[in-house]
Amino acid sequence: MEKPKVLFVHQEITPYLKESHMGTLGRYLPQGIQEKGKEIRTFMPRFGCINERRNQLHEVIRLSGMNLIIDDTDHPLIIKVASIQSARMQIYFIDNEDFFQRKFTLKDKNGNYFEDNDERAIFFSRGVIETVKKLGWAPDIVHCSGWFSSLLPLYFKTVLKENPMFSETKVVFSIFDDEFPDQLNKDIIKKFKTKEMKDEDLELYKEPTYVNICKAAVNFSDGVILSSEKINPEVESYVHSSGKPLLKFESMDTYIDDHNDFYDEILVSESVLSE
């Protein structure tokens, strides 16, 4: 029997960024799930504050070289990789000079969110998809963590729905206490819309606030995880009312077992529904 495959798409992973709850989960959850017998791949953005020399990042030439068009502009996709030897785990980094060379993550030196975070998130999500295609690695579950990965559920349930490689893939979305103020660029729909997306799929993106993009991610996910003790109350209420399978915030002592069981629940429930 083949090992279930879990694709982790993280906004932050320790030790590449300053230590945080999100980054700690990004570091140790994939390792724990791998040790539970599942096959994993892990992705994050190659933010410019990541020290490539210290962390031994190197470009993977065979995966790089594609151009992704966002808002009529070509952006070269560069894929880098690093290894966490103690965990026998590789991390793939999505990179691009326009979006990820600045020495900050999502905010500038004055604490203001970058105006092009919408395009950066689009590029990151599409970069993950194109790289996984090139790897020829069809995940059973895609686990998206943090709002920066929140477009992936939409892509998997619309653009990739008929792709044989991803037609059976289930998507899980982790919600953290990572709210941003105001909203993303109002033209975000024009920048990511494809012919596979219906008008009703895009309704929440007309006002791309943190709350709305999280609600949209919930709509397109097969399961939801509350990964911080406190999250936006409107988002939390929406999750509970959605009826989606839910993993509530649990003790860090048992989180690997809790997540592993939740993945199995998603896979089993979906297979039963399809019979």
Image: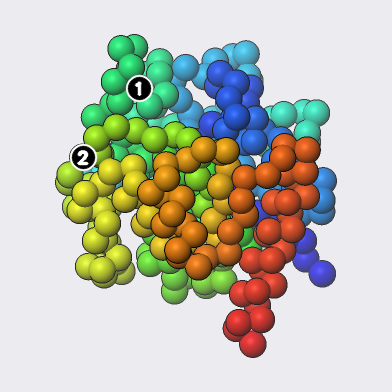
Q: Quadrant of residue 148?
A: top left
Q: Nearer the viewer, residue 179 or 118?
A: 179
User: Judging from the image, what secondary structure is the residue with disc 1 in?
Assistant: loop
Location of residue 138 in the rendering, given as x and y in whole percent from the top left corner: 60, 61
Read off the residue under disc 2. 185
Direction from residue 176 to residue 99 in the image, left or right: left
Location of residue 87 in the rendering, given as x and y in whole percent from the top left corner: 78, 33
Direction from residue 226 to residue 88 in the image, left or right: right
Cα distance in 3D space between marks 2 and 1: 15 Å
Read off the residue under disc 1. 107
Q: Is residue 40 above or below residue 12?
A: below
Q: Nearer the viewer, residue 274 or 224?
A: 224
Q: Which residue is at 26% across, 68% downward? A: 200
Q: Is residue 163 above or below residue 25?
A: below
User: Judging from the image, what secondary structure is the residue with disc 2 in?
Assistant: loop
**Mark 2 vs 1, N-terminal side:** 1
Q: Is residue 112 above or below residue 31?
A: above
Q: Nearer the viewer, residue 248 or 73?
A: 248
**Residue type, numbered disc 1:** Lys
